Image (tube, rainbow, N blue to C red):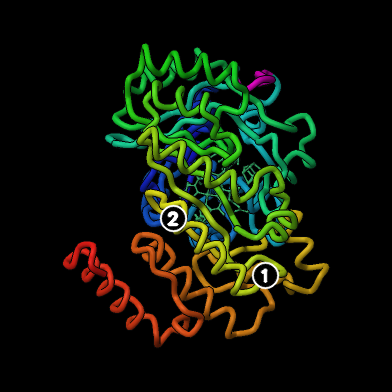
């Protein structure tokens, strides 16, 4: 059988469908991965019997339009998978099959019927198939699935509820991770794990493997409280050049609301200085306009980012993704009407919560200048946060930077 898997974009590797492709080929079938833009032409030429769509929230309508078009020209079975069909299956009546959660066992059983293999542990799952992503400079890997934490805005807590046997973090054998990286021989490695190197013994063994056998730069995600002296030393020795860590909000009240009580403002400052001293680049991730927040909370978050002086600061606008605990809370408390059609494919657009238009515009503007403010160390005034004022703020900020540089020490 011929199986075509469609993702939104192939700009970077997409591990979910690459894992599925491995399984499909291992079961003796043909598989190709394409993107939304090329899917129609590709399908008409190749005539697959099965088309699988990998759908994140915000993109389902684009996939539906593609499916309607293809169904009018070809005969095939359509399958939908990934976060959106998992947490928000309502309205997928246009698909022949809706797959919830991890797809390896489902697709294997679907294709091989009686004689299928059950992948019990993540170490049993074959490595992802990279054939349809040739010549990528950055290669993605996952050393684990799931997360031991349960932040209320993230899908991991809900995932653990839906699939209790997958609760917490499932970690791959570090030797197998190193062997996979060796076989791919990447220039740069990006670990897409939700939360990397949670177990210290695992991390020590992994670091030794990276240092002795890989010797390539890598990047990964950590929580601020994981950045200890011991870990930073291992990160440095093993080739880590950049870390992404989520502060989310500088407000203790808001961090508590979203289920991130495990660290405080001092922890992010300490983590920042440890990383800086070790010359490891770090990105701080933030969420603006959470439920029960105000523009003052968002500016406090910016101020803390400026104090931490990261390599880059990234700020998104809170989106109440279906199925998440905080998404449900927003609906119950009247912060969100629950029309998931207004969630777009980007969380850099305006908030979909029931906030005043003024606050929404302020945050829309703050999100656009967040990284610039951190880069220049310049805090905006609340009055700067209006669409027509932004060009002027950017001009003022860059002029201040110019003056600081030209009149060294005098200004
Ligand atoms: C890498 C990544 C990206 C990459 C690539 C996206 C991708 N599709 O892989 C980029 C940078 C492009 C990206 C963008 C965004 N992302 Co993202 N991303 C991730 C991340 C960190 C890793 C994904 C991964 O590789 N997982 C490991 C693989 C093995 O698992 P998997 O992808 O879930 O795939 C399995 C199953 O879902 C299933 N499956 C998947 N596809 C299919 C298809 C079929 C047919 C079947 C049967 C099964 C199936 O089987 C797979 C194997 O078991 C996840 C968090 C995480 N750790 O999973 C967030 C995550 C998927 N992203 C998320 C979000 C919110 C976004 C953005 C909206 C953010 C933004 N910029 O606005 C955009 C979405 C853009 C869009 N709509 O396309 C959310 C999704 C929430 C939601 N309800 O949709 C997640 C879960 C993060 C989170 N904690 O909330 N992201
Ligand atoms: S630590 Fe990250 S991945 Fe884990 S539950 Fe929280 S937001 Fe999700």
- How far is the residue under mark 1 from the one under mark 2? 20 Å
Front position in the image: 294 or 191? 294
| Residue named by callout 1 | 293
Cβ of mark 1 under 8 Å from ligand 2: the answer is no
Helix, strand or loop: magenta stretch: loop
Picture quadrant where residue 379 is located: bottom left
Give the residue displayed 23% in from the left and 67% down from the top: 410
Can residue 89 be seen in the rendering of this structure? no
Left or right of 46 in this view: 63: right
Front position in the image: 52 or 220? 220
Give the residue displayed 70% in from the left and 67% down from the top: 291
- Which quadrant, please, contains the C terminus? bottom left
| Residue at the farthest right position | 332
- Residue 191 disc label: none
Picture quadrant where residue 190 is located: top left
Bounds of the magenta segment: 115-122
Left or right of 244 in this view: 86: right
């Amino acid at each position: 059988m011929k199986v075509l898997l469609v993702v939104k974009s192939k700009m970077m590797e997409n591990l979910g469908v690459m894992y599925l492709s491995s399984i499909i080929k291992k079961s003796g079938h043909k598989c190709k991965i394409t993107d939304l833009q090329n899917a129609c032409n590709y399908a008409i030429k190749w005539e697959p019997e099965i088309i699988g769509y990998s759908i994140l929230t915000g993109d389902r309508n684009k996939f539906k339009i593609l499916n309607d078009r293809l169904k009018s020209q070809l005969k095939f079975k359509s399958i939908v998978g990934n976060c959106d069909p998992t947490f928000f299956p309502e309205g997928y009546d246009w698909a022949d099959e809706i797959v919830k959660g991890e797809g390896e066992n489902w697709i294997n059983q679907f294709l091989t019927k009686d004689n299928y293999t059950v992948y019990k542990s993540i170490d049993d799952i074959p490595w992802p198939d990279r054939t349809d992503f040739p010549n990528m400079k950055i290669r993605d890997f996952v050393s684990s699935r799931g997360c031991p934490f349960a932040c209320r805005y993230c899908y991991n807590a809900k995932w653990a509820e839906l699939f209790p046997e997958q609760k917490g973090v499932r970690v791959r054998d570090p030797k197998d991770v190193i062997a996979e990286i060796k076989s791919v021989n990447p220039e740069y490695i990006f670990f897409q794990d939700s939360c990397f190197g949670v177990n210290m013994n695992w991390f020590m063994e992994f670091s030794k493997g990276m240092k002795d056998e890989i010797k390539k730069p890598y990047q990964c995600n950590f929580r601020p409280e994981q950045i200890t002296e011991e870990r930073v030393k291992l990160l440095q020795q093993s080739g880590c050049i950049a870390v992404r860590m989520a502060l989310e909000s500088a407000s203790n009240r808001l961090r508590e609301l979203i289920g991130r009580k495990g660290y405080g403002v001092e922890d992010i400052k300490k983590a920042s200085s440890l990383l800086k001293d070790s010359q490891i680049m770090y990105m701080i991730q933030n969420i603006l306009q959470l439920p029960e927040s105000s523009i003052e909370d968002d500016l406090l978050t910016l101020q803390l980012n400026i104090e931490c002086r990261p390599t880059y600061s990234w700020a998104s606008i809170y989106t109440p993704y279906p199925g998440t605990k905080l998404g449900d809370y927003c609906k119950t408390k009247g912060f969100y009407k629950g029309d998931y059609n207004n969630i777009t494919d980007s969380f850099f657009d305006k908030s979909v919560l029931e906030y005043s238009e003024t606050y929404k515009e302020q945050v829309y503007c703050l999100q656009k200048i967040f990284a610039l403010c951190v880069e220049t160390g310049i805090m905006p005034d609340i009055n700067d946060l209006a669409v027509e004022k932004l060009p002027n703020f950017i001009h003022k900020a860059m002029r201040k930077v110019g003056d600081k540089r030209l009149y060294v020490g005098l200004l």
